[in-house]
Amino acid sequence: MQIIGQPFSEPLVQSLLRHNGTGDDVLLPSYWRLLNTHIIASDWQLGMRIHHEVCEGAEEGDPEDDFGPWWHSHWIPFATSGGGDTLIVDQRPNRRRGRIGEADHEQGTRFRSHPMWSSLPALMDATATALETGQAVDGYLPVAADETELDWEIL
């Protein structure tokens, strides 16, 4: 938190205290792996370097919109695709604070409308429900790849 210069949201703190990342194991639909605290700080710093060098002076965009800037200092990365994309918690001070965004390294950041992306607790709850029931959530169906590996099928 000292590197980022702002407090983590309480749901993110609770998540990190519980499992501090999932390593190479996919957990969230459809292919997201949770980051540990060290990688969160490193990814945030990388986003800030890219923002400073590439996006300095760029239009930030409407914080209530479904698309955001390429990066923002109030975004906290918490999951990775392993291919350069991250899920972020949007900590900007607005009415949708706490929502989850997908920071795509090629297309910028987007915020989905499905309720499971409205907050980290909503995302974790929807994921747990899908895993417990075997039902799809937002077009993703949990599939056991083997006894130790989770996968998500896109419907």
Image (tube, rainbow, N blue to C red):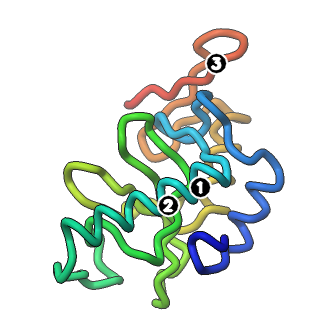
* Circle nearer the N terminus (3, 1): 1
The reply to whether the C-beta atoms of the residues labelled 1 and 2 are less than 8 Å apart is yes
Query: Amino acid under label 3?
Result: Glu
Residue drawn at x 51%, y 31% is 141
Of circles 2 and 3, the one toward us is 3
* Circle nearer the N terminus (1, 2): 2
Height in image: 37 above or below 26? below
Residue nearest the viewer, comparing 61 with 73: 73
Residue 61's spot in the image, x, y percent? 23, 81
Secondary element at tag 3? loop
Residue 47's spot in the image, x, y percent? 38, 61
Query: Amino acid under label 1?
Result: Leu
Query: Amino acid under label 2?
Result: Trp
* Circle nearer the N terminus (2, 3): 2
Give the position of the N terminus as an image quadrant.
Answer: bottom right
Q: Residues within 10 Å of mark 2 (few under 14, many from 20)?
A: many
Disc 1 target residue? 123
Label of residue 117 in the image: 2
Height in image: 83 above or below 6? above
Residue drawn at x 48%, y 73% is 90
Figure quadrant of residue 7: bottom right
Q: Residues within 10 Å of mark 1 (few under 14, many from 20)?
A: some
In the rendered image, the residue lying farthest to the top is 146
Q: Residues within 10 Å of mark 3 (few under 14, many from 20)?
A: few
Residue drawn at x 42%, y 62% is 101
Secondary element at tag 1? helix
Residue 40's spot in the image, x, y percent? 57, 55
Disc 3 target residue? 149
